[in-house]
Amino acid sequence: MVLQVSPTQKQVNITWEALPGDFVLPDDPVENIQQPPLAAALTDALGASGRIQPEMLIGSNFGLVATVNKKIVVKAPDWFYVPQVQPVATDIIRRSYTQNLEGGAVSVVMEFLSDTENGELSIRSTPPYGKLYFYEKILQVPTYVTYDPYEPILEVRCLQDGKYVLQPPDTNGRFWIPELELFLGIWYGERLCQTMNWLRWWDGEGNLLLWSSEQAEQERQRAEQEKQRAEKLAAKLRELGVDPDAIA
């Protein structure tokens, strides 16, 4: 992937305005076949561990909006996290998000790499804006994650003095994501009959956040172990001439 060179910077006026009701959002196809399950798995683990609250907004392939020089700009990241948004009526479907208007700033954005020329590491500063430029200079997202599941390569950039700086991984090859107070790393294994390099969360003590399917399997195994213990105890009582049903 070629990193585009930014031309001479022009004055950029950024405002946060409501998206017109008749605005047609881009309906770009998913460029990476692994993107939907990767994004779903990240959200699933957060939900299964009780880390998703009603005031949060977590989405995938969902439009983030800014008005730049009086023109609406929309980017739909593969995964994003906003810690605090304003509630909407139950009969309204949120179709996009404009920070500083509908709630707080976007805290984390992830993009899963594709082979498009104007891709995830583009710093193009004129329309159509490169994604890195848009997240760094316009939305000013504190943490920007890029992931190539085929290599696999995971990179985390944090905003420092208005510029993204690559962060080093820890000794386990994971990255601390301060906005979520979790580590993010690569895990090879199976989920929903798909075996690949997943992105997964670990807490501050190094404990893996389980998917809901893993939690269900743990519960099934625990119930089976309890059943076997009860059966062994009942058999032992019968050997001693005691009716376990009478005890119950």
Image (cartoon, helix red, strand yellow):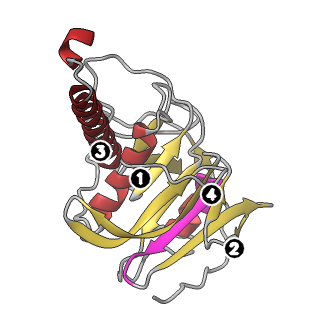
Residue name at image x 41 percent, y 53 percent: 42
Precedes in sequence: disc 2 or disc 4: 4
Looking at the image, the residue that sits furthest to the right is 161
Mark 1 sits on what residue? 42
Q: Position of residue 157 (x, y in %)?
A: 64, 67
Q: Name the secondary structure under disc 4.
A: strand
Precedes in sequence: disc 1 or disc 4: 1
Asked if the stretch drawn in magenta spans residue 36, the answer is no
Mark 3 sits on what residue? 221
Whether label 1 touches label 4, CB < 8 Å: no
Whether label 2 touches label 1, CB < 8 Å: no
Whether label 1 touches label 3, CB < 8 Å: no
Label 4 crowding class (10 Å Cα cut-off): few <14, some 14-19, many 20+?
A: many
Asked if the stretch drawn in magenta spans residue 137, the answer is yes
Give me the disc on residue 171: 2
Mark 4 sits on what residue? 143
Query: The magenta stretch spans which residues?
Result: 136-150
The kind of residue tagged 3 is: Gln
Q: Position of residue 76 (x, y in %)?
A: 38, 55
The kind of residue tagged 1 is: Leu
